[in-house]
Amino acid sequence: MLNDSIFNPRFAAVACRRPKKVDKRLTPLSIYILTHNSERHLDKVLTAVKRAADDLLVVDSGSNDATLAIAAKHGARIAHRAFDNFRAQRLFANSQCLHQTVMFLDSDEIASDALIDEVMALKVSGFSHDAYTVRRDWVVRGRVVHALMPASCPDYPVRICHRDKTDFTEHSVHETPVGFASIGRIESPLIHHTFESKSEVRRKLDQYTDLAAIDLLARRKWIGVLWFKQWFSPIGAFGKWYIRNGNWRDGRVGLILALYASTYTHRKYRKALLQLISE
């Protein structure tokens, strides 16, 4: 079914670029980035990963800034897919990769030199696990933070996997890779830059809570439960992220992030409730 979706009119063809010649002594690696108006960090993201990529792919969902020009400058193949949710976007990206071993990053995650060195070493020795988690340090407004909902920081998301042995959970947002039989861990970090402006916070709140509300409705929550949770869960979310998960150690930025967690929690339940009432 996924392969059929490639021919849907919503999707444009992958730009024709010749993949890099693969050294047969090394395990070939595809690397993909999901983008949408991602010009801020994309040049650094692609510069960092290009050294390890035998196939560099950008899957774009309608950028109107310099994103595509930056991708072209780095010799990336470019695929276009209208965005519906993150799980579907990642499955599509996996289907477009040329090699079985895949590394994937967000467009604001910059790989450290040490991380790329470790990936290159794995290409030499062979990837002995089906998937690998990578340490990710979160930077908000220039400050490394201790938590940002839904993750304590640093966290260890899967960022390398065998594409035929990995699926993603049925979540529209905060999708998680699953299905692998063995997993390794890489301590050299990704540096994740996020929430760098008020407008970015507002945009992510709108996008992520729209998707989270869809997931709540799919679980068939009762109206009374949604009404209760929209008012009381945000209080718990603030306490969880500010006190228990350590945002209090991040100063004013930490307070902003705890308020984000509270607002996110209220809005996802509120949006699901309004949608359920309107049906």
Image (cartoon, grey):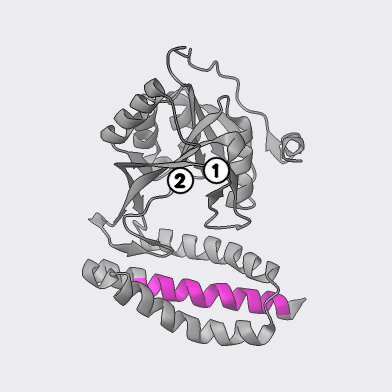
At label 2, counting other C-alpha atoms closer than 10 Å, the crowd grade (few under 14, some 14-19, many 20 or more) is many
Residue under the point 27% across and 66% down: 253
The three-letter amino acid code for the residue at tag 1 is Phe
What range of the chain is rendered magenta? 258-276
Quadrant placement of the C terminus:
bottom right
Percent x, y for residue 168?
59, 49
The overriding secondary structure of the stretch rendered in magenta is: helix
Q: Is residue 149 left or right of residue 223?
A: left
Of the pair 2 and 65, the residue shown nearer to us = 2
Of the pair 69 and 184, the residue shown nearer to us = 184
Q: Is residue 17 left or right of residue 220?
A: left
Residue under the point 43% across and 63% down: 150
Disc 1/disc 2 C-alpha distance (Å): 11 Å
Residue 266 included in the magenta stretch of the image: yes
Quadrant assignment, res 188: top left
Quadrant assignment, res 243: bottom left
Of the pair 8 and 127, the residue shown nearer to us = 127
Dot 1 and dot 2 residues touching (CB under 8 Å): yes
Question: What is the secondary structure assignment of the residue under circle 2?
Answer: strand
Percent x, y for residue 222?
69, 82
The first of marks 1 and 2 along the sequence is 2
Query: Is residue 7 visible in the rendered structure shown here?
Result: yes
Quadrant placement of the N terminus:
top right
Percent x, y for residue 269?
58, 76
Residue under the point 63% across and 39% down: 92
- Residue linked to disc 1: 180
- Residue linked to disc 2: 158
Question: What is the secondary structure assignment of the residue under circle 1?
Answer: loop
